[in-house]
Image: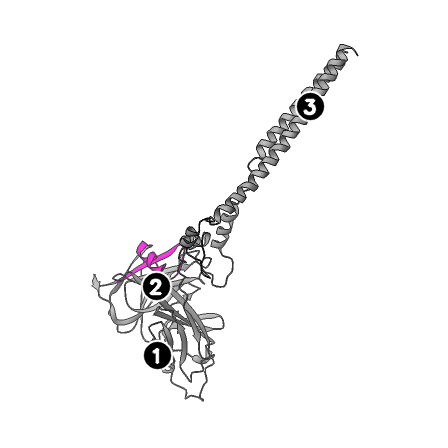
Amino acid sequence: MSKKKLVMAILLAFTLSLSMISTAIVHAQEATSQAGEVKSTDSESQSDEPEQSTSSENESDEPELTTGETIGETDVTESESTEPEPLEYEPSLTLVSSTWTGQSDIVLEAQAKGGNYSDREIYLYVGKESIGGIRVTPEVNLDSDGNGKIVFKNSDLQNAAMFGPNGEEEINWSEIDQMEIGIYFERDGQYKGRIIYVPVDFAVSGPTEPTEPTEPSETTTITNESGVTMVLPEGAPDQLELTVTVSGGAEEKAAVQKVIQVDGDKIKTFDLSLLFSGQPYEYNGQFTSTVSLPVPEGWNLDALALYYFNESTKEVTPVLFSVDRENGTVVFATNHFSKYVLVQKDAAVEDENGETTEETVKETTKKESAKVTDTPKTGDSANVGLYTALLIISALGIAAVALLRKKI
């Protein structure tokens, strides 16, 4: 055999030997890593077990575990447990009778769950359209836990006047299809409203005697440059001047949002006052007037709410109103003036039917964006390095053999 062929054979044997040694090293490291993991797992499990004492004295000193006692991880779990967050306040309201016929009271069964009765609203519907509201104060009989009955007396309902687009007017109950009764509860600063729809099937006792038509009383309408109008009844002083200041105050918004969620900045405060012969007129119960407030352009007429803002207590009270769609105004009756707050409710946030809302969509998007891909396990990078070194050595050996053959 020539020297050149001998050198080529030696290089080829050397290359194959390096490949086998590298492969053995890789498999040895993998086996060592797996054995280390098993050993680590065994040592951890063994460390959790109590040590066995070889002395009888040590055994007698250890307390015996009785049935039901736990050690180790259970104690840690109990010490790290946190108190559950308080549940959101959710009172309930149930209609005792199904339909109001004008022959009995309307009785509501309330479970205020430790809360208090706060206020109420009643609106009348013909078909699916609200034509106005009524003011009837119920008898509230709730115990210390907020459980009991809220009763609207039959006589009070029948004698109530309706406040509609044309001001105060009589009710033809035979035309009314249903009532919407909203009851507000409060507990620890949480205000919750519950709505009950009462079907109306007013029973007319018999034909009534025709009455002579009455002449409409003389009224005076005064208008402010802000678009607010006030209809004064007969008997109100002459030469009254209406002054209005429109704003979107922070105090009023904070008070309203204790009751409902406002849709963004869609809130307007109307500070109403009267002047008589250029001097402030104390309007507090002398007469009842009908006031119309303009609804800002672009607001949803089906999602409006109106509140009276008490400047002393910084709280709001819901006001009965109707919507004049033709003129784009809300109409209500009042016998005193102060600040009245008109808002558009945010229907996307309050969802009691379990439907997906704008807030839940945002939360889901946030959770999805927080997901990350799995990273390699510890040790995988070392194996990759060994395989790379093996490929480089093999490539160098093959290149050397090919070069020698070419020279031969």
Question: Could you tell me how many numbered marks the image carries?
Answer: 3
In the rendering, at what x and y percent does residue 323 appear?
Answer: 41, 66
Residue density around tag 2, few if under 14, some if 14–19, many if 20 or more, within 10 Å? many
Q: Secondary structure at mark 1?
A: loop
Residue 307's disc is 2
Please tell me which residue lies in front, 383 or 340.
Answer: 383
What colour-coding does the image apply?
Answer: one colour
Residue at mark 3 to residue at mark 1: CA–CA distance: 120 Å
Residue 17's disc is 3
Position above or below: 317 against 54: below
The structure residue drawn at horizontal position 74% and vertical position 17%, both measured from the top left corner, is 9
Question: In the rendered view, does 16 fall on the left or right side of 98?
Answer: right
Position above or below: 263 against 122: above
Q: Earlier in the sequence, mark 3 or mark 1?
A: 3
Q: Secondary structure at mark 3?
A: helix
The structure residue drawn at horizontal position 49% and vertical position 70%, both measured from the top left corner, is 128
In the rendering, at what x and y percent does residue 130 appear?
Answer: 44, 70
What amino acid type should be assigned to the residue bearing mark 1?
Glu
Please tell me which residue lies in front, 47 or 77.
Answer: 47
Residue at mark 2 to residue at mark 3: CA–CA distance: 91 Å
In the rendering, at what x and y percent does residue 375 appear?
Answer: 55, 39
Question: In the rendered view, does 359 fall on the left or right side of 376?
Answer: left
Q: Quadrant of the C terminus?
A: top right
Q: Is residue 253 part of the magenta span, yes or no?
A: yes
Q: Quadrant of residue 383?
A: top right
Badge nearest the viewer, 3 or 1: 3
Residue 225 in view: no
Q: Earlier in the sequence, mark 1 or mark 2?
A: 1
In the rendering, at what x and y percent does residue 380 appear?
Answer: 58, 35
Q: Which residues are magenta?
A: 249-273
Q: Secondary structure at mark 2?
A: strand
